[in-house]
Image (cartoon, rainbow, N blue to C red):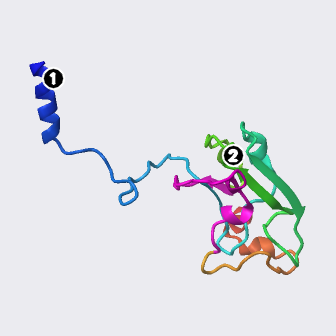
């Protein structure tokens, strides 16, 4: 009994490890897998080409991708196709990161945002506009009108591949 009392006294004198959550936020680890983000190139075009490899790799079947054809008048991505519909059901997602690993263009990334809350099941389905990151300062929003055959020269990754 005396030993238990001494343990209690020692813990009273120690600094508490509790973090006051809403006011203080602990930094996440570098390998943390949080809320999904769809990335863009520097010129504003979307990295997602609508291949649906992320949906095929998802073990929870939480991702739905529907692809459409790009045109020079309405260009969303540098490829032939783009994801016209991209939805993630966050209630089904297990945050495994397989979608991130399967993406050939590194379009989908699991970020560091862990504050996810929903009041209904429909709020848990994140559409493309909620997942897309904002347009960069030097970029322009999609769809873009691009001269025929010139869309690949505007993207640094494509330009480096042809040099």
CA gap, disc 2 and disc 1 = 50 Å
Does the stretch in magenta take in 46? no
Does the stretch in magenta take in 132? yes
Q: Is residue 138 above or below residue 155?
A: below
Q: Which of 58/125 is in front?
A: 125
Q: Is residue 84 left or right of residue 133?
A: right
- Residue at image coords 62%, 40%: 96
Q: Which residue is mark 2?
A: 99
Q: Which residue is mark 1?
A: 4
Image position, residue 151 (x, y; %): 79, 74
Q: Is residue 145 above or below residue 33?
A: below
The quarter of the rendered structure image containing the C terminus is: bottom right
- Residue at image coords 66%, 43%: 93
The quarter of the rendered structure image containing the N terminus is: top left
Q: Quadrant of residue 56?
A: top right
Nearer to us of marks 2 and 1 is 1
- Residue at image coords 72%, 41%: 58
Q: Earlier in the sequence, mark 2 or mark 1?
A: 1
Number of residues whose C-alpha sits closer than 10 Å to that of mark 1, classed few (under 14), some (14–19) or many (20 or more): few
Q: Secondary structure at mark 1?
A: helix
Number of residues whose C-alpha sits closer than 10 Å to that of mark 2, classed few (under 14), some (14–19) or many (20 or more): many
Image position, residue 155 (x, y; %): 71, 71
Q: Secondary structure at mark 2?
A: helix
**Magenta residues, as a range?**
107-135
- Residue furthest toward the top? 1
């Amino acid at each position: 009994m005396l030993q238990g009392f001494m343990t209690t006294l020692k813990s009273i004198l120690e600094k508490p490890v509790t973090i006051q959550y809403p006011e203080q936020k602990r930094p996440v680890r570098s390998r943390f897998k949080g809320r999904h983000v769809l990335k863009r190139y520097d010129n504003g075009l979307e990295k997602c080409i609508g291949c649906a490899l992320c949906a095929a790799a998802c073990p929870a079947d939480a991702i739905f991708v529907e692809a459409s054809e790009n045109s020079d008048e309405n260009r969303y991505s540098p490829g032939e196709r783009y994801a016209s519909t991209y939805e993630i059901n966050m209630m089904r997602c297990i945050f495994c990161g397989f979608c991130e690993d399967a993406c050939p263009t590194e379009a989908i990334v699991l970020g560091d945002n862990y504050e996810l809350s929903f009041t209904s099941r429909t709020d848990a389905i994140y559409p493309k506009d909620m997942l897309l990151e904002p347009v960069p300062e030097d970029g322009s929003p999609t769809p873009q009108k691009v001269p025929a055959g010139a869309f690949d020269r505007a993207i640094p990754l494509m330009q480096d591949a042809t040099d």
